[in-house]
Image (spheres, grey):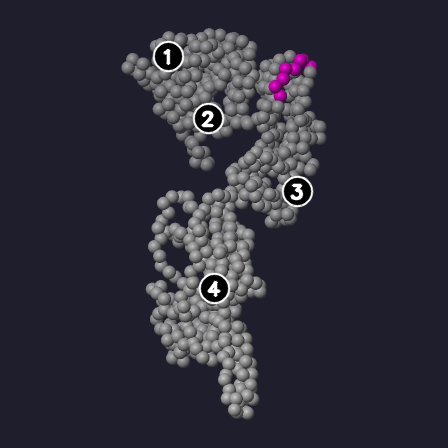
Amino acid sequence: MRRLLVTLLGIIVLTMTFAVGPHTISADDHEPGVTLIAVDLGSTSVGEKDAAVAETALRILVDSVGDGTVALLPYSDEAGTVVGHPASGSDIDNAVSTLVQRIASRAESGGSDQFAALASAFGYLSGVSAPAGSEIVLITGRMQDGSQANRDRIIGFADLFIAEGWKINAVMLPSTTNEARGFLSSIVERASGRWDDTGTLLGLDMFVQNVLELDGELVLDITLQSGNTAVQAIEVAPESTSLSVAMVRNSANASLDLFDPHGVQLGSTSNAATFITTPNLVVATITSPEPGTWSLRASGDGRPVLASVDLRSPLALRLVEQFPLQAGLQAVLMAEATVDGVARWLPGSIVTASITSPEGTSAVYRLYDNGEGGDALFGDGIFSVVFEASGDQGFNEVVLELGWDDYGASVEAFDSFQTEIFPTIQVEPSAGGSVEAGLEIVVGTIQVTVGEYPHPVLPSAITAIVTGPTGESVTGSLRLIDALKDGTGWRFEVIATPSESGPQTVTAELNGEYVGRNFSTSGPTAQTSVTVNYPVIVVLPIELDESSLLLPIIGGVLIGLLVISGVALFVISRRQVMPYGYIYDDRQELVLDLSSVRRGGLKGMISRGVISGADAPDMPVPGATLVFKKTGLELHYDNSDGATMRVDGRPAARVVELRDGSRIGYAGRLFEYTTTRRKPRPIEPPESVEVEPEKSASPEPAAG
């Protein structure tokens, strides 16, 4: 309670001391903050190195503020006067120069009253209504009063800064005491700020990189004797927007020189570069640097120096996002070169990809933007190559590198793509055997797997072609083995109606989508031997009366005619296609088994491949005639009764071809023609994920 009362009294007095400044909003509706830099002149007077680091910190802190107000507060035994200035202009430049002279003089020895500095800063920020996000930076290294009471008062002010949304930061000078470092760092962390320890060159370099928002790569970490130099090449790529070179040194006796690709040295007065120079630091920044090889030359003073390079470019390289690739097959790898996120043609550029597969093997490929070899379009900024994807499933790591014919610079990017094992299809022969002409028989089995595991698919995803011994091909129908509830399965029987005896060759193709990518695959062929049984025509002998002289002649003529007629009928019947297939109604009940329609006499011999309404009273369309041909089934309809007929949702012509699954609409009813007989049977769901292979079911003959 005592700490809170003291703190509140201090706030009231300090707030009344400062006049309320104008409250402004920038053009982009961003409310500029206030950056208050408090320099502990008592700590800067401890040594020459402390003074040099304090000047460096002050200058780069001021340079880093883009808008708003910069307020300066010198303090030692007591707080000085806080004076605010616009973030840029001669006003702040003059104020910094004046304060730098006081730092360099090292004449203001004394204590370091951190409470007084925080109290004065809080009063100023409150008086100007500083918005949230404003901050104070303490450049210090000591504590005047380390008592617990003073610590409590400082903690109280820190909590008030937190309540206002203001940050407390600290720059610890090289001679910072352990007491000050431990306590002040805890206060900074309490107020969500940042503290930097500048006691080493590396610590000073980290502070510079953070304040100036650099992301430099360390290129020199060396101790050079006086008069000795070190040269470092800097490769600048096309499209680069800025080049910053920072040298952190122990004294101004170490120097940094920068040369462009033509060997011309950039001086502090060069229009092409801006410089920040302090006793501990030299920073040179070039906007839109010329591509090529630049040079950095460092001269030593007998002590260590650090140099880093920050090269900025909107140029980026990345893989074009795509779905997983099929393992073990040829694929196209595509990389995109962009400038500010837009694909850009880069003349004279070279793009390579080093791919490490899931099993650890590596290969390097060159990608092209020439419209050839897998590249879709010339000069569109998309570089492509056709390559053999790894046969293993997993992630493939890719290192992309963009270079140029005329420059030594390169741009690297790290990415990855995925390879997957896709479904495959296997075709096996069946038992085969004998079958009556016009009836169905199982001529093969199909299995679909991914690796060693079953992969259920819909029957519509598979196309099976059955080719007879004469080369005539038909599309086989599929029957699921152990179907799942969703109508899918991974094992199928291939059913066909062979017209010739001999080997029936089955080929199959699977088309579908897997892991977001469309694919097509076919399996090996399989042959099943089938014997087709045709009916035999028997010619009976005619007994003649031996007493008649004319009977032998007449009998011989009749026998000859019968033989000729029989041969003709046999030839005609062999050229006819026997009826096959089934017609179901919209309740999936069998209306007509076409293979069971039997007609005797001459009509049955000459036109056994033709079924009319007279032959089949259950024909769903009166007046229609079905004509079975080797090329398929035709429906002839004369519309004599005035009723309309539709096939597969369209008005039917006088002659229309029916296919497996064709739907026939007539007189308000719907019928379906199919080559596969439907036999309902209960389907039990699988009890486990693994499916044990079963023996192929015996062929199921059609009714008739």
Which of these two is toward me, 277 or 423?
A: 423
* Horizontal and vertical percent position of residue 605: 48, 77
The tag earlier along the polypeptide, 2 or 1, is 2
- Viewer-side label of 4, 3: 4
Label 4 sits on residue: 435
- Viewer-side label of 4, 1: 4
Q: In this view, does 413 lie above or below 83?
A: below
Tell me, for residue 151, which label it has, or none.
1
* Horizontal and vertical percent position of residue 476: 49, 60
Q: In this rendering, would 497 be left or right of 389?
A: left
Q: Which residue lies furthest to the front in this view?
A: 547
Which amino acid, mark 3? Pro
Which of these two is toward me, 493 or 364?
A: 493
Q: Distance between the residues labelled 2 and 3?
A: 47 Å
Label 3 sits on residue: 347
The tag earlier along the polypeptide, 2 or 3, is 2
Which amino acid, mark 1? Arg
Q: Is residue 180 above or below residue 502?
A: above
- Viewer-side label of 2, 1: 1
Q: What's drawn in magenta, residue-wise?
A: 220-227
Q: How far apart are marks 4 and 2 (CA)?
A: 99 Å
Label 2 sits on residue: 69
- Viewer-side label of 3, 1: 3
**Within 10 Å of the Cα at label 4, are there few (<14), some (14-19), or many (20+) other Cα atoms?**
some
Residue drawn at (57%, 63%) of the image: 469
Q: Is residue 646 above or below residue 70?
A: below
**Within 10 Å of the Cα at label 2, are there few (<14), some (14-19), or many (20+) other Cα atoms?**
many
